[in-house]
Every structure is written in C-alpha cells, then in structure tokens.
Image (spheres, coloured by chain):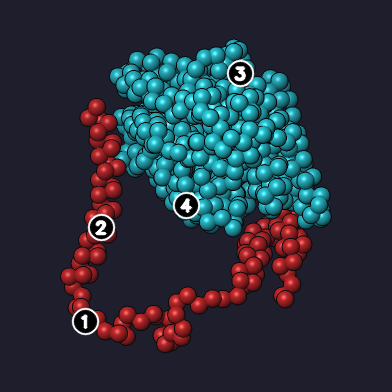
Amino acid sequence: MSQLLRSYLTVAMFGAIGVLLAALLLAISALVRPNRPNADKSKVYESGVDPIGDGWSQSQIRYYVFALLFVIFDVETVFIFPWATQLERYAGFGLLEMGIFVFVLLLGLVYAWRKGVLRWV
Amino acid sequence: MLSTLLASDVVAPFSSPKIDYHALAPELVLAGVIVAVLLADLFLEESKKWVLSTIAGFGLLAAFIPIVTLAVSGHRARSMFGGAYVVDTYSLLVKGIFLLAGYVVVLLSQNYLEEGDYYQGEYYFLLLSSILGMVMMGSSRDLVTIFVSLEFLSIPAYMLAAWRKRDLKSNEAGTKYYLLGVFASAVMLYGMSLLYGDTGTTILKGIGAKLQNGSMSPVAVLGIVFVIIGFAFKVSAVPFHNWAPDTYQGAPTPITAFLSVASKAAGFVALINLIYVAFPHGGDVFQPMIGVMAASTMTLGNVMALRQTNIVRMLAYSSISQGGFILMPLAVAGGKSSGNALTAIVTYLAVYAATNLGLFAVIIAVSRKTRSGEVSSWGGLFSYAPLLGVLATAFLASLAGIPPLGGWVAKFGAFRAVITSGTNWGYALAIVGAVNSVIAFGYYGSLMREIWMKPVPDGDTAPIRTPSSLNAALMICGGATLALGVVPGIILRFSDIIKL
C-alpha cells in the first residue's frame, strides 16, 4: 500500500512543481519589474510599426485555401527529398511506396480542382 | 548510438518489409472504398449523390469479408512491422464490431443527409476515414501506431461533429470536441514520450517486459498515468467527460450515435491494448486510478442523466455512465481475473454498440415526426407507432440490464470479472456498480413511462413513416440485442478465443 501511495506521490509532486514553477516565475517578474503603465506600452505591437485599424481586421478567405494547398505540396517535398537521395537503395519497393503516397496527395489536388478553389475569381 | 551511425560509411542493404496482404486486407479494402467515394463525389451530379451512401455501405460490408476469411484461416496471430501491427482473434473481433457499427451509422445517415441538404460526399469520406482509423486501432501494438490510429479516427470526427455548419450548437459541438481532443492528445503524447524514455522502446510488448510492479521508476509511473488520462478523454470518463453532453447534443444525430458507440469503443480498445500488452505488470499504478474513474464515471453520469429533459442529452449522460461500467472490469485487469475482464469488456462493447445504435435509430425515426428532442415529445409513442415503441423499450431495457436482452449478459460479465478478482477494490466496485444499475433504471424507466402511459402531447397520432434504410438499421440492432441476450453462448465462446 505504501508502494502504491509512493507511485502517486510522484504524480502529485510533478503536478505541484509544474504549478509552482509557473507561479514562481510570474511572481518574481511581478516583484522585480517596475510598474509604470502608459498608453504607448499598451498599444498592439506589430514589428515596431504603428498599428492601423483594430485587431479584428479581415483578410481574404481565399488565402486560406492556398495555404492548405501549400501544405499538401510542402509535405510531399519533405518526404520526397530524403527518399530521392536513397532511391537506388529502396529500388522498386520504394518507387511503389512513393507512388502510392503521391497518388493519395494528388487526390487532394483533384478535390481542390473539382471544387473550383484553384480559380481566383 | 547516433555518432556510430553517422560515422559508418557502410550502408546496410535495404530489404523491403514483409507484408501479409491477407492480414491487411480489411484496411486495404477500406482505403480503396475511401478513394472511390472521394472520386465518385467529385464526378457525380448533385441528383446522383445518393450513390455515395450505397458505395460506403457496401464497402464496409466488403471489408468485413476478409475479417471472416482471416477468422477461419486458423492462424492465431499474424505479426507485422516488428510487432507494431498484430492481427489476432481479439483484433478481428473488435474490427468486426467497428465495421458493423459503421455500416449501421451509414444506414442511419442516408435519409438524414438527403433530407437535410448536407454535403454527402465529404460526409461519407470522413466517416469511412474515421472507421479505418478504428480498424487500425484494433491491431496497433506500438505507441506510434496507436497515436497515428487515434488521430486518424479523431480528426474526421471533429469535422463530422460540426457538420450542420449553419447551426450554432453544431459549431459548439465541433469546437469543444476538437479543443479537448487535441489537449488530450498532447497529454497522452507526453506520457508516451516518458514511457519511451524510460523503457527505450515503443513496441508495447517491449514496454511490458520492462515495467514491473514494485520496481517501476517515477518516470514510468508518470507515463502510465498520462497515457491513461489521454484515453480517459476519449472514452469520456469522469473527470474528463465535460465535452460529451454538448458535443452529443450539437452533432448531427447519426454522428452522435457514431461518437457514443464506435469512437468510445476505439478508446477502450486502445486502453485494452495498452493495459494488457504494455502494462500487464503495472497493476499497482493503473488499477486504483481506473477503479476510482469507473466508480465516479458511472455515478456522476447517472445522477446527471436523471435531471435531463432532452433525450439526446440524457443518452449522452447515459453513455458516460455505461462507459463507467465498461471501465469497471479494466480496474481488475492484470490480476487473477484478467481473462474474465477482457471477455467482459469486449462483450460489453459489442452489446452496447448494438443497443445504443438501435436507440439512436429510434430517436432519428421519432424526430422525423415530432421535430423535437424533448423527453415529453415521446408521449404515447406506442399508441401510434407500436413497433418503434416496443423496440425503444427493448433497447432501454437492455441498457438497464434486464434479462433476456443483451445488456444483461454484458452487465453479468462485468460484475463477474470484478467479483472473481477477490480483492477489496473489486468488491467495492461491484457494490457501486450494483447501486448504479438501480439508479439508471430511474431515467430509462421514465422514458418507458412516456412511451406507454403518457398521452400524445399534441393529439397528432399520424403513424411515423420510416425509410427502408432506417428500418434495416432498427432490425439489425434489435436482432443483435435480442440474440446476444437469448443465446449468450455465442458471446461466452469469446472467452476461449480472445487472448492477448
């Protein structure tokens, strides 16, 4: 029974340390830093340029689709490059596997094409 | 190790892994069907989209064929990829449950989607993807494979929960499910990384050989606790159940049925794989934890269900409390009633799938007429839809565990497992479970009273017209619920076959 409690003591200690650590860091910085609020400090920070408009500005939804399509090809590249360097070693098996992988990704492109997202109206 | 790898010029010759295509056939068939559904959706006109549900339905049945041929082929276990993927009798059984449950969900979805003007092609594509993830989970015997299967089955489910995208409730359902699901994945991954760090392997069998009661390092204890917490979210065990009622209420009803049955069963399958293969000698750590979770899950689920006036929300809490009953045998796994516990859980999953899917089929049928989810809208159901009334009563009685229906066999197995463990934990759990069975009858009974004794709320006694696909789903679930209860022999045979 004591063994059992000791096991869970680890978990409890782990949780307590996690909470304590966060609380401690926040508390120390709150104690050490000076507190002089002014309007410039509470402004939205964007690469040092003065912000224009408010934080809820809208951007074109189409960028989202392009971002998704980019991910498809990005992932493809990430896997194809290392595979290409070892192509001779993996031989026919590797070719088949990569063929299946590219086919599945192509399905995504076909889907995007048929749904008309490749057209910029 | 890394430095030696980098230093060596000699590259070992590559040999392609041996793949047992017969063992992988269910997954391969499903993958083919998924591609077919996606392509068919893209090149079909809007008026012919009904074909998609047919392809999906037959595809699931086609994937069932190799499961049967594998079951009769006589091999006890086929292991692939260095033990990461194992096809044995247990995994075939749970794969069969997933595929049939998926088939019933397709039947439930057919008219719901056609009449609701939803996106059919993507719906069946995502549904099949999620089922493929579950089928893979049945065979996963490796931390990484388990994680991939889990994400494969979860991510389509997040989107399906938010399918009625013009309805705020459905958006809330999808968002809550997604956020908590991702959080659970993160906790679980952290636990997995600790387990890997402590044992140096991701293969469950290898982890099982390293972890021994009494000599476990604190890191391993943390790993076990975190991994189990991750899956506790998936099976909505208290205190990780908060997402379930909102998600179940907001999601389209066929998806609610799917989440509460198949997705939950997949979580239990993962827990079984982990506990029976990776932590069989770690009972000191997981038993008390799962025991406390099981007791609080069934109690809280039942108490909250008593207060609900919306049927789907009531069933959500009922499914939480049923989850507690399924967890109950897991709390004595690893002890001397390990085998009993495994049989009990798998039996419970099969029975629960048949019963709960059936009850959701009745809900979908009734709400076609009443357009309401309130308990009071079921008043006098028997007087104008006698067959639905009788079926609903049978499913409720099965959930409550009344013989001769399936739920009785399931509960009997669960209680037998905890009592034969011979530990005080087991006896305490059995008492909590028994008290909860009585409480549960409170709300199952109140629904039955609505069906049989209350007047029809608005006096509209026109009969309910159910489409043939819904009828088929009702017949399958009703037949299975009755058969599993009347002939428990077909289930008790499992105890001889299922070994992990």
Subunit ID for the residue under disc 3: B
> In terms of image quadrants, where is residue B61?
top right
Task: Kindly identify the amino acid type of the residue bearing the numbered disc 1.
Answer: Arg
Residue lying farthest to the bottom in this orientation: A50
Task: Kindly identify the amino acid type of the residue bearing the numbered disc 3.
Answer: Leu
Q: Which residue is mark 2?
A: A21
Instruction: Mark 1 vs mark 4: give the one in front.
Output: 4
Instruction: Mark 3 vs mark 1: give the one in front.
Output: 3
Q: Say whether residue B250 is visible.
A: yes
Q: Output the letter for the chain in red.
A: A
Q: Which residue is mark 3?
A: B482
Q: Which residue is at 56% across, 76% downward?
A: A59
Instruction: Mark 4 vs mark 3: give the one in front.
Output: 3
What hue represents chain B? Answer: cyan
Q: Are marks 4 and 3 on the same chain?
A: yes
Subunit ID for the residue under disc 1: A
Task: Kindly identify the amino acid type of the residue bearing the numbered disc 2.
Answer: Leu
